[in-house]
Image: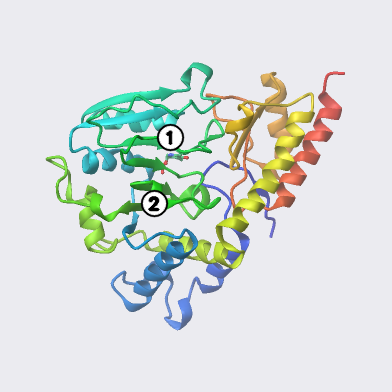
Amino acid sequence: MNRIFNFSAGPAQLPLEVLREAQEELPDYRGTGMSVMEMSHRGKEFGKIISEAEAVLREIAKIPPEYKILFLQGGGHTQFAMVPMNLMKNRVADYILTGLWAKKAAKEAALFGKVNILASSEDKNFSYIPDCSDLPVSPEADYVYICENNTIYGTKFHDLPDTKGKILVADMSSCFLSEPFDVTKYGLIFAGAQKNIGPAGTVVVIVREDLITDDVLPGTPTMLRYAVHAKENSMFNTPPCYGIYICGKVFEWIKRRGGLEAMKKANEEKAKILYDFLDSCKLFRPTVVKKDRSLMNVPFVTGDEKLDALFVAEAAKEGLVNLKGHRTVGGMRASIYNAMPKEGVEKLVEFMKKFEGEHGRA
Ligand SMILES: *Cc1c(COP(=O)(O)O)cnc(C)c1O
């Protein structure tokens, strides 16, 4: 077996322990004679898998009982529509633009109502988080929307915006469970699994119960109503069973390793290794303002596209793969989610030092 260090932004590396457990249980799940992929979602075994996944998530993220946890399908993009369809009662919502995903969400919401842009960092290619301490929140807005960690640009909201009493909705796809967070500050959180918690195909939605109502926009399909999924405990139709099973294993893995505080500590340690090098070296340059840096996604450039391409190709030969940056930023991006071991980051920095020695300007 040859496991490499996979720096992909998503679908991303999963903990080897989790893959091993799944492998062990694949053909015969705990004496049932079948795999989790083959069992009825209405059966006793799967009922246990989904309820345990939910219970462990509730425990590690300290999710209070007045918040519902849903396991849905359709990825982040379906949430870009479900959020306005379910929450935009006055047909007005406020969005903060900190990257491509926030922009896409705002564009989708504009299909359903009036979207106000409260703040944006597009003027500097989303390399910072705008000041959100005194935003011109619309009095009639149904919610304020943020993308909390900007996967492509490598920025993170380290302080939540002052929504002036409005409901805060957050896309946490690329920072979910990377550190502790206070659920009670949000009305709704969603996270596509394929970044930090599992395989593509599952999206976790955490939503405050009073926001789950039948008062949705006219024409909202049954499948896109939070109330329908909440009432059926994510079993309105066939849920993404295997994805939920793997997410459950990742939640257990996080719990075994000491929960979200331990994740934060490990993630800070890993990110520091990389940022410290980026701040001290001459060849590579980080693209994000220091105070807004993400612990999960770290973009950097040399300033020379040919050299960037050479770096990405040479790194891959060393077993450091998927380091190419997003086309809107260029250069490189190292995604160092929970499952990336410290050795992966150390090896990357070692390789960067070597590359700088060979290609750096004197
Ligand atoms: C990847 C990503 C998305 C898109 O998710 P899909 O599951 O592909 O729809 C949305 N938001 C953020 C922050 C992401 O990182």
Judging by the rendered image, the residue that carries numbered circle 2 is 184
- Residue type at mark 1 is Pro
User: Could you say where residue 354 lies in the image, as x and y percent from the top left?
Assistant: 84, 34
Q: Position of residue 47 (x, y in %)?
A: 34, 73
Give me the residue at 46% from left, 38% from top.
160
Which quarter of the figure has residue 351? top right
Q: Quick one: which residue is furthest to the left in this view?
A: 218
Do we see residue 215 in this rendering?
yes
Measure the C-alpha gap from mark 1 to mark 2: 14 Å
Say above or below: 346 vs 123: below
277 and 358: which is toward the camera? 277
Find disc 1 in the rendering and name its residue.
161
Mark number displayed over residue 124? none
Is 14 on the left or on the right of 284, as rendered? left
**Image quarter in which the N terminus is found:** bottom right
**Residue at screen point 30% across, 53% down:** 208
Dot 2 amino acid type:
Thr
Mark 2 burial class by Cα count in 10 Å: few <14, some 14-19, many 20+: some
Residue 149, given in percent of the width and then of the height, sits at: 50, 38
- Residue 127 placement, left or right of 278: left
Image quadrant in which you'd find residue 81: top left
Badges 1 and 2: C-beta atoms under 8 Å apart?
Answer: no
Marks 1 and 2, the one that precedes in the sequence: 1
> Quarter holding the C terminus?
top right
Position of 112 relative to 262 (above/below): above
Q: SS class of the residue under badge 1? A: loop
Task: Answer above or below: position of 224 versus 356.
Answer: below
